[in-house]
Amino acid sequence: MSLRLKDGYNFIKEEGLFFNRLYQMVKTKEPDLPVQKKEKTKLKKAYYLMTIETLDKIASVSLLKKICSYVNEYLIRNPSLIMEPTRPLQTINAHLLKEFQTQNTHEVILSVIEQTNLNYNSHLTNEEIWLEIKTEFLKYCFRNHQELEELKSMENNARSFGIELLVKEIKKTYEKLVAEEKELSEIVKSLDPENCTVSGHEIELRKNYNETLKLIQEKTRLYGKYGRTPFLRAYNERKNERNKTDEEETARQLIFISEHESKEELQSGVESLTLSARKFRQEPQKVIKSANVIKTADRDIRDIR
């Protein structure tokens, strides 16, 4: 899933603020300074991994060369990461993954932020509840991005074999999943305590927090072992059963799905993907209308860096 330069920059900035807020929570809850420093280092490294992955998604943009160079220089200056004076970003990424004993970037990031929430989040304040919501949303995003990548691969295969009905339905599903994530993202942002004040509406705000958390968790559970959407799940299941990857077998799998799944069946489970998000979006809007929505000022995230 590629990103535009502007979107990539905004994502890195927003997630930097999120990781910084996690660290601020640790600082207020952890009296032991050595432990506090250890937690800071883990959060910092998880954020670096997220930053590197984001840069990889937009590395094809020529204007990013200078940004990549700058970030690279910044990262290698960090004492906890220095191994060689001029390591490329990919080397830093591999070094961190090796340190965490995994090849999965998302696994590292989620493990770190979930453990931080487990150890230090008491879920008593609006800030703490929102940090939990944000964590659950990132978990959803990682699963959704994986689904989108597999759908894109399946679409390319279906197009190469001329199965236009399947291509059309995959594209529609892809767009709906992208729209759903964007919609959920707007809900999460609207509930950020730093973006709005809801004087006199604390009970309503907490209700929206709880319903948002439940909604995101329900969406995340839809992503099973073989995928979320019906035809991708069927495709992966058949591929796993036959354990074959040659072109002839791929064609048979795609043709089978296209012929045995009617258009309505292909769309089942798809048309309802965003209904709950769309329905729920109306709820927080009531709160936002009564709130004083403010433009979030740029914050210094030096603590996490």
Image (tube, helix red, strand yellow):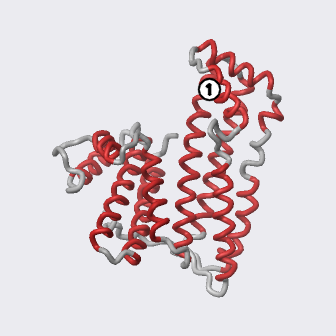
Element class at badge 1: helix
Give me the residue at 69% from left, 74% from top: 207
Q: Residue 226's quadrant in the figure?
A: top right
Residue named by callout 1: 240
Residue extending furthest toward the left = 85
Q: Residue 94's quadrant in the figure?
A: top left
Looking at the image, residue 48 sits to the left or right of residue 277; the answer is left
In this rendered view, identify the residue nearer to me: 295 or 260. Answer: 260
Is residue 297 placed above or below 115 in the rendered structure?
A: below
Give me the residue at 42% from left, 50% from top: 108
Residue extending furthest toward the top = 248
In this rendered view, identify the residue nearer to me: 203 or 10. Answer: 203
Give me the residue at 29% from left, 51% from top: 71
Q: Quadrant of the C terminus?
A: bottom left
Q: Residue 217's quadrant in the figure?
A: bottom right
Q: Position of residue 255 (x, y in %)?
A: 72, 19
Looking at the image, residue 240 sits to the left or right of residue 38; the answer is right
Give me the residue at 40% from left, 42% from top: 102
Q: Position of residue 79 (x, y in %)?
A: 20, 56
Dot 1 alpha-carbon crowd within 10 angstroms: few under 14, some 14 to 19, many 20 or more: few
In this rendered view, identify the residue nearer to me: 226 or 187. Answer: 226
**Which kind of residue does numbered mark 1 sit on?**
Asn
Q: Position of residue 57 (x, y in %)?
A: 44, 41
Q: Position of residue 59 (x, y in %)?
A: 39, 40
